[in-house]
Image (tube, grey):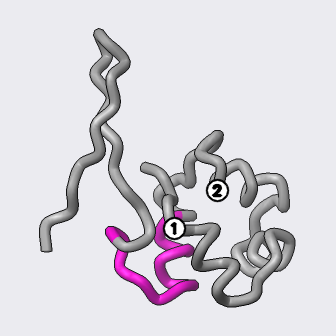
Amino acid sequence: MRATRLKALREARGLTQRRLAHDLGISQNNVPAIEAHARQAGPKLQQQMVRYFGWLFEDLFEVVLVDPETGQKRVLEARR
């Protein structure tokens, strides 16, 4: 899972990474790592983010499938 729209949502609301981390109850270092896709939000944090921003899960996250043999990545499109 990648939080592909996290940075845009955060900035649109005028939130700093520090403020968002505080509001979500996570370490300040987690927000830039999640925004850069260096770290993934776990299921609990994913649900917190969905509730916090009031968006649908598929509007905030994208599911990335990785072929274990080739390492090739493919984004799974959400059904609407």
Tell me: 18 left or right of 48: right
Which residue: 64% across, 86% down?
12
Q: Which residue is mark 1?
A: 5
What is the span of residues highlighted in magenta in the rendered image?
46-58
Residue 33 coordinates in the image, percent (x, y)? 71, 48
Tag 1's secondary structure? loop
Q: Is residue 14 above or below residue 10?
A: below
Which residue: 77% across, 70% down?
21
Q: Amino acid at mark 2?
A: Glu
Residue occupying the far top of the picture: 69
Which residue: 55% across, 74% down?
49
- Residue 79 sits in quarter: bottom left
Q: Amino acid at mark 1?
A: Arg
Residue occupying the far left of the picture: 79
Residue 11 coordinates in the image, percent (x, y)? 69, 79
Q: Mark 2 or mark 1, which is nearer the start of the sequence?
A: 1
Answer few, some or many: residues within 10 Å of disc 2's Cα (few below 14, many 20 plus, some between 14 and 19).
Answer: some
Q: CA distance from mark 1 to mark 2?
A: 8 Å
Tag 2's secondary structure? helix
Q: Is residue 2 above or below residue 72?
A: below
Q: Which mark is residue 35?
A: 2
Position of the C terminus, as image quadrant, is: bottom left
Residue 50 counted in the magenta span = yes
Q: Which mark is residue 79?
A: none
Tell me: 21 left or right of 80: right
Residue 44 counted in the magenta span = no
